[in-house]
Image (spheres, grey):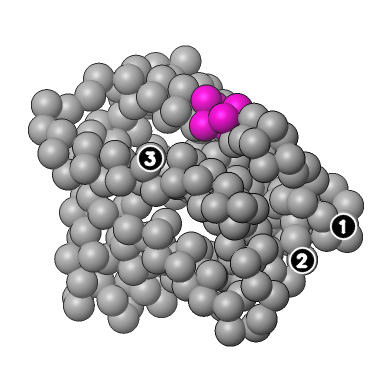
Amino acid sequence: MRNLKQFIALTIMVLIPFGIMVWFRDHQSSGFASIELIIYPLLFGGLSIVVLYLLKKHFLKESFSEFNSGKGTPGTDILWGFGLTVVYFILFYIERLTLSDLLSFKPNMELLGLMLDMRKNPVLLILWFGPVLWIGIALYEELIRVFILTSLWKFSDRKLWIYTVILIASTLIGLAHWSQGSYGIVTVAIKSSVACLFFFKYRRLLPLVIAHVLYDGIQVAMLLITYPH
């Protein structure tokens, strides 16, 4: 019964939303206004976090504390977050050198338009680098990642299963970036496996969130600074 409840919760929080996300991104052709690309991630991510909390507390009868059960302090979490960011960027450049010519990449022109609009609108800039990036993107995605891991790890504590779950989680998260092409799927899955391995060893959520914010935020900031006006 407990395993069935875990699977139902995973279906509600991961399989259904990811499936809708992939379908929508693959079929949407009318585009979004910049403000919608701000509001949608914030609403979707924020509401998903609330639903996850309610599922954990009332349906699964579990505590959110298992997402951050390892030993650590805010100071060490910040240091680990910076360390993971360095690893992500090292992988970023290795992937560009080795995979960019082998796999296809589909640039997100709507997101690029949003980024460029932010240079002209300080409010959009504050919203994106603030609640959108921290809550709607980083916190939401990292909570989903650790939810997949901790839920499936309850089925077995064998090492083979633990690493299989890491592969499953990284594949699912990679496939959620279907709209970016095979390059996006593979490279996101690779970085996700690093995040999963870190969580397996240290069981700390905050470093994953910090690294996610820094990795995405630095790339967007560089784009805003260097892209021609």
Query: Looking at numbered disc 3 in the image, what kind of residue is underneath it?
Result: Pro
In this view of the protein, which residue sits in the foreground, 90 or 55? 55
Name the residue carrying label 2. 202
| Label pair 2/1, CB-CB below 8 angstroms | yes
Residue found at x 17% / y 27%? 31
Name the residue carrying label 1. 72
Query: Looking at numbered disc 2 in the image, what kind of residue is underneath it?
Result: Tyr
Q: Secondary structure at mark 3?
A: helix
For the residues labelled 2 and 3, the Cα–Cα distance comes to 28 Å
User: Which x, y percent locates residue 98?
Assistant: 31, 81
**Mark on residue 38?**
none
For the residues labelled 3 and 1, the Cα–Cα distance comes to 32 Å
**Disc 2 or 1, which lies upstream in sequence?**
1
Could you classify mark 2 by the number of other residues whose Cα lies within 10 Å: few (under 14), some (14-19), or many (20 or more)?
some
**Disc 2 or 3, which lies upstream in sequence?**
3
Residue 43 visible in rendering: yes
| Label pair 3/1, CB-CB below 8 angstroms | no
Q: Secondary structure at mark 1?
A: loop
Q: Quadrant of the C terminus?
A: top left
Residue found at x 52% / y 76%? 164
Magenta-highlighted residues: 46-51
Residue 106 sits in quarter = bottom left
Q: How many marks?
A: 3
Could you classify mark 3 by the number of other residues whose Cα lies within 10 Å: few (under 14), some (14-19), or many (20 or more)?
some
Image height of 25 relative to 102, above or below: above
**Mark on residue 17?**
3
Residue found at x 69% / y 32%? 58
